[in-house]
Amino acid sequence: MIRCLAVDDEAYAVKLIADYINKVPFLQLAGTTTSAIDALSRVQQGNIDLVFLDIQMPDLTGMQFLKLCGSKCKVILTTAYPEYALEGYEHDVIDYLLKPVAFDRFLKAAQKAFNQLQPPVSTDAGGAKFPVPSTSLPENPLSAPTALLPNYMFIKGESKNKFLKVAYDEILYIEGLKNYVSVFTLGQRMVTYHTLRDLDAQLPQPPFYRVHKSYIININQIRMVDGHTIYIQDQAIPIGETYREGFYKIIKEE
């Protein structure tokens, strides 16, 4: 098992990562903390393999943590600020998760951690190398938890600590505007200050597909396709030229 520590100064965010860790068979939740200083102390005790670390921490920033931590454990960064990604990779982090973190994206990062933290290779008397057997880690780390993907996501609201829960099957379509994204559901319109690219990377496919530079649609909500236009309820959504070939292939296979 990979022993994990979830670190975030936002109580909700650290709970979400802890819940995700508990869903994955080859991860073990070793603890949670809202203090980077406390996290550093735990890592230095030598019983943590992997840290899910928020960059924007009040007492000790994520980057300062990485410098002090050194090679004592592996780190996956979590933050709402994509501009920190490059600096994080310079510190040899495993992956970089943008908030709000979707479970399928979390699983991809967990698989990367699994690949880097596999059991060591042993050598027998004849010099032949073989992996040390383990009953706790699956051969395909994503095979077991795939069925556990949640049917919802959280999107960041207008304030730092506000997150809105939205069920996937209630999302009609998502429209990207200049400075924000509108998520249209069966009952309301939600505004989030993430990019369309962020949400496109986090939403499961199927049923969500990018069909235009400004639109992501839920294919289950399509009422009609007429030429290069998709109709969801009464909303007409254009199919961008770049996305047409892929989209028509998808609906022909449905």
Image (cartoon, rainbow, N blue to C red):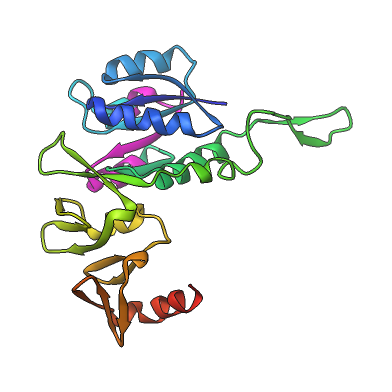
Residue 8 pos. (x, y %): 27, 27
Residue 207 pos. (x, y %): 39, 61
Nearest the eye: 112 or 29: 29
Residue 159 horizontal side relative to residue 134, left or right: left
122 up-or-down from 203: above or below: above
The verdict on residue 166 being magenta is: no
Range drawn in magenta: 66-89
Q: Quadrant of residue 181?
A: bottom left
Residue 117 horizontal side relative to residue 96, left or right: right
The residue lying at 30 percent from left, 88 percent from top is 227
Nearest the eye: 123 or 185: 185
Q: Quadrant of residue 37?
A: top left
The residue lying at 45 percent from left, 74 percent from top is 250
Q: Quadrant of residue 154?
A: top left
Image quadrant holding the N terminus, namely top right
The residue lying at 44 percent from left, 31 percent from top is 21
Residue 5 pos. (x, y %): 40, 23
The residue lying at 64 percent from left, 37 percent from top is 138
Q: What is the number of callouts on the image?
A: 0
243 up-or-down from 191: above or below: below
Outermost residue, bottom side = 227
Residue 6 pos. (x, y %): 36, 26
